[in-house]
Image (tube, rainbow, N blue to C red):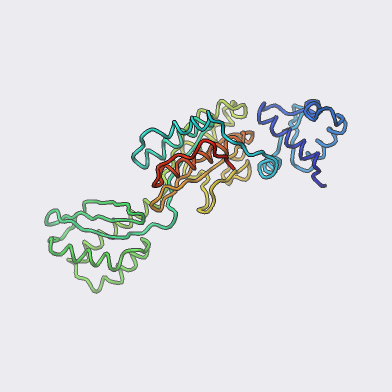
Amino acid sequence: MKLTERKRKILKVVTERYIDTADPVSSKFLAQAMGGKISSATIRNELADLTDMGYLEQPHTSAGRVPSPKGYRLYVNELMEHKTLSQQETDQINSALSGKMRELDSVIAQAGQMVSSIVSYPAYSAAVEKSSVTIQRYDLLPVDANSFIAVVMTTGSRVKSQLLHCSIAVTPDELPALANLLNSHFTGISGQEMGQKLMSLAGQLGAELFMPLSLAIEYASEVLDRSAQNQVFTTGQAQLFQQPEFQDLSKANELMGLLTDQKDTLPVLDENTSMQILIGPENVNEALRDASVVVASYDIGDNMRGLIGVVGPTRMDYAAVAARLSYFAESLTKMFGKNNQLPPKEDTIP
């Protein structure tokens, strides 16, 4: 059955009314909203068609209709009007970002807190590598006869170091040769490839070189493993209880558990996607089957990008959340950029 312009209009009105009130929308309200130009009987027929087509649902306790996940998806893709932030909203975001945030983890965590307070939904944030991380350079610094400091620089010029203890003596004179060996054979490859290359060189190296070399490779592999694990920060979980859908604790518990104990399974974006809206069953995680997620990315630099996600009911105000999240992400990109400039207040959010 074709989705006529009148059906599209009715679906848009039902969706926006339900977002505002959380109450099923009646044919009587629709007749008034359509300016009395369409009879109640015609509207009831259109509602029945939209329900049969899967765009609307009818709760058992009400004669009114609510959008289905399929209805929300059509609304987001084709019917939702893009929103321009008000000066008050841009001022609020710019003010939140004007404070000093120095450590990267602190910036990521604070970004989620700011978004949650602005949109009044739970939020999560993370930093992820744009591409696979590898070791770019090694330096070995002497400490004593059986210890040295391994310094590794990864993709994006991030530097890590650790004191390593060796069961055999390592003289300061041997460290430059070890560092040269590491930089010649163990850069730009994965941890697994480093292990394979170490084994292939084992027969060519004496114990005095192989043992400290294997310690440095083991540490470098640990650095790469940690880099591949995204640390996810969540905040604003209590905001769930402000929503009618989650005032029943049994419905909120699974989602709260996800946000608290399984936050590393929250949706992330493909590298070439700047924003995505996932509605109800579109989310892979079962805990999100009755929720929606809006997630945006921003550029941190140094091969890093940040993610900010908002979790709320399928009834969330998608236009408002997408506009605020888009502006916030753009602001963070500019904050991390060379100009350190916030976007102008008159920007329109697509």
How far from the left and from the top, in percent, is residue 104?
Answer: 36, 42
Seen from the viewer's position, the closer of residues 323 and 54 is 323
How far from the left and from the top, in percent, is residue 198?
Answer: 29, 67
Q: From this view, report whether residue 64 is shown above or below residue 213.
A: above
Seen from the viewer's position, the closer of residues 138 and 262 is 138
Residue 63, visible in the rendered structure: no
- The image quarter containing residue 290 is top right
Q: From this view, report whether residue 230 is shown above or below residue 198.
A: above
Report the quarter where the C terminus lies: top right
Report whether 22 appears left or right of 293.
Answer: right
**Outermost bottom residue:** 204
How far from the left and from the top, in percent, is residue 39?
Answer: 87, 30
The residue shown at (21%, 61%) is 212
Residue 244, visible in the rendered structure: yes
Instruction: Count how many numbered circles sit on residues in the image.
Output: 0
The residue shown at (48%, 38%) is 124
Report whether 279 appears left or right of 36.
Answer: left
The residue shown at (78%, 43%) is 53
How far from the left and from the top, in percent, is residue 109?
Answer: 41, 37
The residue shown at (84%, 32%) is 44
Report whether 172 appears left or right of 316.
Answer: left
